[in-house]
Amino acid sequence: MGHLTHDEFFTKLADIFTTRRTKAHGAVFLTQKRLSHNQPTPSNPPSSASPPPSSDPLADLHPAQPLPLLIRATNGKGKDDRAAKIKLSTVVEPDALEAFYARYAEVCKAGMTALKPRDRTKRKAKAKKRKGGAAAATAA
């Protein structure tokens, strides 16, 4: 399956958040990484007229031009329910990055409105017990 357009990606991402909200559980994994596939590297110069590659072992961290980003989203289904797993991906060019992130933030915020805070009462009780136990030991 190829990469989706930005509009398709946002529509399907909103659908993933909606189905997760209706089931009252589930995870949505969002990842992003630099897309360097098929990009010229110092060891693979684009033309023979370019200068020889430098001896910098981290030369790929300093590309000649900004690289596009690969944005992925999955609904978190695992080995047991592979048929229900949804995978989305899109490529964002550097010049469209700011507009993409603005819309990406809107979709993510809208999808996370139904989140409830974690129940941390057990953690707090455990910390209080530990704190009280240490104070009692020093007083004795």
Image (spheres, rainbow, N blue to C red):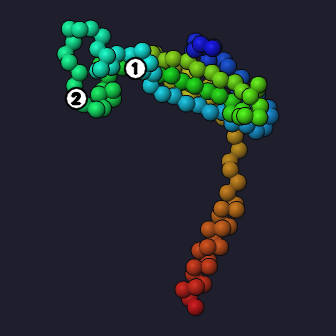
Q: Residue furthest bottom?
A: 140
Which residue is rendered at x = 21% and y = 12% of the image?
50
Q: Position of residue 82 (x, y in %)?
A: 74, 28
Circle 2 SS class: loop
Residue drawn 51% across the image and 17% down it: 91
Residue found at the far right of this picture:
23
Q: Position of residue 134 (x, y in %)?
A: 57, 79
Q: Nearer the viewer, residue 54 or 63?
A: 54
In the rendering, at what x and y percent does residue 105 appear? Answer: 56, 28
* Front residue (pair 126, 109): 126
Mark nearer the viewer, 1 or 2: 2
Q: Is residue 63 left or right of residue 109?
A: left
Name the disc covering residue 67, or none: 1
Give me the disc on residue 55.
Answer: 2
Question: Alpha carbon of mark 1 to alpha carbon of mark 2: how far?
Answer: 22 Å
Q: Residue at x 44, y 25 (%)?
A: 34
